[in-house]
Image (tube, grey):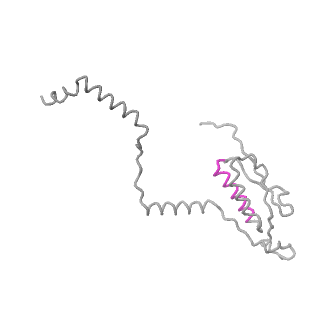
Amino acid sequence: MKLRKVTEGVLNDHNNKQIITILFYFLISMPFLPLAAYPVINPTQTVILEKQQRDLKKNLMPSLKFVSIDRQPIAPEQAGSSDDSLCLVIKQVKLINIDAFPNAGRLIQWAKQAQGNCLDEKGLSSLRGTLQWQLVVDGYITSHVTFTEDSYVDGTLFLTLIPGRLVSIEQP
């Protein structure tokens, strides 16, 4: 009985218009209401996650091994039997085919880090690997960085960027 008495007042025509009007305004104002749920952030957990992210980034990026530019390249007769001490003084790094990559800014930054340094074989390999890694990070997984026969001329290191192409993607 009580249920009927409560619903009788709601069901009359006057109340329906008010309810519909209220619902209409609520529907219109919904896009402006912030309905996103945000997690509670634990500061210690944030610090741990940021440290893990930095460590992961350091592990993924090989460090460039530089020798001070004050040293001159050692001639083979001066080095004796050890070829590990040879290095190339890099005055400038030029990236060939850089126009094929719209996100070239990061590649250029990595290349500029080598300028003004003396790189040995490991340093050159590390520079190539770092540029290759940056291509992958930028989404160019089929592209690669390579040295050519005339990659080093008068202090200028030329690195060739070869854009990769996908012919097709097949699903098994």
Residue extending furthest toward the top:
13
Q: Which residue is drawn at 80% across and 61% down?
A: 92
Q: How many labels does the image show?
A: 0
Relative image position of residue 149 (x, y in whole percent) = 84, 56
Q: Report the magenta residues as a range.
A: 123-139
Relative image position of residue 78 (x, y in whole percent) = 85, 77
Q: Nearer the viewer, residue 22 or 167?
A: 22
Quadrant for residue 6, please give it: top left
Relative image position of residue 46 (x, y in whole percent) = 46, 60
Q: Quadrant of the C terminus?
A: top right
Quadrant for residue 19, please give it: top left
Q: Nearer the viewer, residue 91 or 153?
A: 91
> Is 130 positioned to the left or the right of 22 in the image?
right
> Is 139 positioned to the left or the right of 150 in the image?
left
Q: Which residue is drawn at 72% across and 63% down?
A: 113
Q: Does the magenta stretch include residue 132?
A: yes
Residue extending furthest toward the left:
1
Quadrant for residue 118, please give it: bottom right
> Is 121 positioned to the left or the right of 6 in the image?
right
- Above or below residue 68? Residue 162 is above
Relative image position of residue 76 (x, y in whole percent) = 86, 72
Q: In which quarter of the image is the N terminus?
A: top left
Predominant SS along the magenta part: helix
Q: Which residue is drawn at 16% across and 27% down?
A: 4
Q: Which residue is drawn at 64% across and 47% down?
A: 139
Q: Is residue 36 magenta?
A: no
